[in-house]
Amino acid sequence: MYNISYSKFLPFFCTLLLLNACGGGGSSAPKVSMSAPKVSMSGASSIELNSTLDLSRSSTSAESCTASDGWSGDKATSGSEALTLSSLGDQTFTLTCRNGSGITSQSVEVKVYRIVTGVVVDGYMTGSTVFCDANVNLTLDSGEESVTSASDGSFSVRSGICNLVSLGGFDRDMNNSLDDLLLVSPLRATQLEAVVSPITTVASFMENPEDLNAILGVDPSIDLMTTDLVAKKGTSDEYDLLYEKGNQLTVLAYVLQKAMGDTGDTGDTSEDAFSSITKVLEDNYELSEGKHRVQCVHRNRCGGCCKQIWNTTFC
């Protein structure tokens, strides 16, 4: 019989037991679950036209990022960019980041505006409410920028893509309060200076406002949308005539307003009156085949309520 001593094998057996308890050499490290990236962006909510927007971005666990909407191209997963914004209106800047587990997008909304300066003119209108009418309903709505015209009729208002509207005010030349007078000036896309007057109001209701110079029989080189007729009064017979036409359009609008039953209560303005005047002007211009200014013979179309004023204004 062999006398076997187990003591010398004891370390070997302990090692085997430890390896079995730990799963041996075939075990693997636990897997880490990756989630979709997190993305953050920041920038000003509004900015003046042609100014620089500082747009910052950061992300967590992103492998790549791409820009879309108001900007484009592949972007680093974090950083910032200075963007010059040269288009009016609401703009969106979106960043989309990806990794092996998913895709995440984040956006910044920016309103791009311009500062429009000008005057409200009948004579100069002081104390009128001037605003950017973005939805073209001729009403000052929540969120629309507004200012009050100064003693010389001047204003400076933040504007986007809109028409400028003036409500009420005091006419310094006529020395009269015109609380329910509504005047409009259609803004061109690049316009930074404007005049709001009875003449621009007629233009705002026209299908083809470029015809207005011909309709009024004035030099086509005169920009009726930006010319201050009060400041030009006395410089030439043509400007004097245009100034008088503007005043008389206001009087005519008020006569029509009364004839149509508007009493000046809250909500009643000269909108319908100016719209009716514009319709008559365009109809007469069309009948004359665009060759002459408005003729007197069609003044009865305004309803017979204002022949004398019509004759004084356009004949």
Image (cartoon, helix red, strand yellow):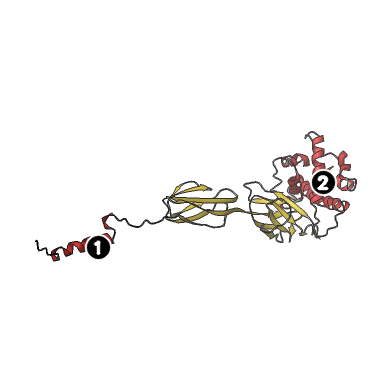
- Mark 2, Cα crowd under 10 Å, few <14 / some 14-19 / many 20+, is some
Q: Is residue 84 visible?
A: no
* In the image, residue 233 above or below residue 127: above
Q: For this rendering, which residue is in front, 92 or 293?
A: 92
Q: Which mark is residue 276?
A: 2
Q: For this rendering, which residue is in front, 31 or 201?
A: 31
Three-letter code, disc 1: Leu
- Indicate the position of residue 114 as horizontal and vertical percent values: 61, 53
The residue singled out by tag 1 in the image is 18
- Mark 1, Cα crowd under 10 Å, few <14 / some 14-19 / many 20+, is few
Q: For this rendering, which residue is in front, 175 or 249?
A: 249
Q: Which mark is residue 164?
A: none
- Indicate the position of residue 20 as horizontal and vertical percent values: 26, 60
Three-letter code, disc 2: Ser
Kindly report the distance in space between the C-alpha atoms of the residues bearing marks 1 and 2. Answer: 100 Å
Q: Residue furthest bottom?
A: 7
- Indicate the position of residue 266 as horizontal and vertical percent values: 80, 60
Q: Give the quadrant of the C terminus.
A: top right
Relative placement, left or right, of 30 versus 299 is left
Q: Is residue 161 visible?
A: yes
Relative placement, left or right, of 90 versus 3 is right
Rendering quarter of residue 32? bottom left
Give me the residue at 79% from left, 55% from top. Answer: 181
Q: Give the quadrant of the N terminus.
A: bottom left
Q: How many marks?
A: 2
Query: Which is more foreground, mark 1 or mark 2?
Result: 1
Task: Tell me which numbered mark, 1 or 2, is placed earlier along the sequence.
Answer: 1
Element assignment for label 2: helix
- Indicate the position of residue 110 as horizontal and vertical percent values: 57, 54
Give me the residue at 79% from left, 40% from top. Answer: 282
Element assignment for label 1: helix
Relative placement, left or right, of 41 versus 222 is left
